[in-house]
Image (cartoon, rainbow, N blue to C red):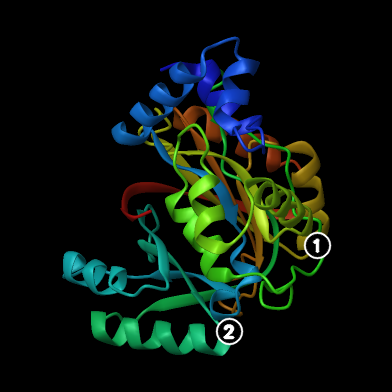
Amino acid sequence: MDKELLMKAQYEMPITETPFSDLAEKLDKDESYAIKKLNQYLKAGIIKKVGPQLNYKAFRGISHAALVGAEVRENLEKAVKIINQENAVKHNFLREHEIYNIWFTIKARTKDRIVERTKVLMEKSGIKNYVVLPSLRVYKMDVKYDLYRGVSFSKRIEDGKVVPKVDELGISGEMLRDMERNFSVEERPFKKFAKKYGFTEGELVDLIVELIDKRVVRDFYAVLNGQNAGFKENGMNLIKTEKPEKVARNLLSEVPEITHLVQREVPENWNYPLYFMVHAVSRNIIEKIAGRVRSFDGIDELKILYSLKSFKD
């Protein structure tokens, strides 16, 4: 892999009318080289997608989210198939845990709707034992990979401000979703969207910059597939603490290897209110990070649930 190109495409992607030409200039390469290589990586599955990455909180129909842990000991394939058929489910992993081995995320308009949808999914799947953990606060959500160090890494954090809804801003949610799903690696990638939705290319570029500032768009970059890029291990770290906000602040300042950091609503029998993810080329790297974190003030317990298989990502 051209690590330098992939690192720049993750961390320093220009937001311009000609982003790939300007990216190539940063690397002292020809535009044709950057476009050709990035498209090769897209085809090979090393890159998932390129372009604006949206914040689900800006869309009313999916503005709430939850993590669900389920105990599935029989008919695993059937249960996974039923869960994955739900459009609101985004990620679904088999993880190492003595009780809950299936972990998936689900989104909906309200928390109550999430609970209702999950209950229906569990009944259809024949699952009786599960736990629903609605998101209370997202402190960080930025999945980027340091290809030189072999571990996830980013310093971008959520500022805690309320994310405005796209309809409140008078912006087409359809257009933004179209751009996120269908942005192409080509000479002028904004051109087709500008023509389709009645903008100039420059206006769309300015809009993306503005929406990043408002956190409606999380970022503009190349999203890598961690597994295909060599990051075979991902650990979901569960933290038991009576001081989730204090611990979260400490994690943000001291552990840039975190990709997701979320505080969740938890039932009395599952007192792990704080969750963070780390991706790496080996478990040893994740264990070393967890070792550092366990010494942080306010942490009563830290448990790592490693991914064994991804069913939906």
Check the image and report above or below for 280 versus 49: above
Residue situated in front as seen by the camera: 215 or 148: 215
Which residue carries the number 2 mark? 111
Q: CA distance from mark 2 to mark 1?
A: 19 Å
> What's the residue at 34%, 27% (across, down)?
40
* Residue 67 visible in the snapshot: yes
Secondary structure at numbered mark 1: loop
Q: Is residue 135 above or below residue 151?
A: below
Q: Secondary structure at mark 2?
A: helix
Total marks placed: 2
Q: Quadrant of the N terminus?
A: top left
Q: Are marks 2 and 1 in contact (CB under 8 Å)?
A: no
211 or 186, which lies in front?
186
> Which residue carries the number 1 mark?
160
Label located before the other in sequence (2 or 1)? 2
Q: Indicate left or right for 16 with 250 as reference.
A: left
Residue 68 location (% of width, % of height):
46, 71
Q: At x 57% / y 24%, what residue is drawn? A: 21
Question: Which residue corresponds to the image point at 54% horizontal and 75% vertical from the top-left?
Answer: 62
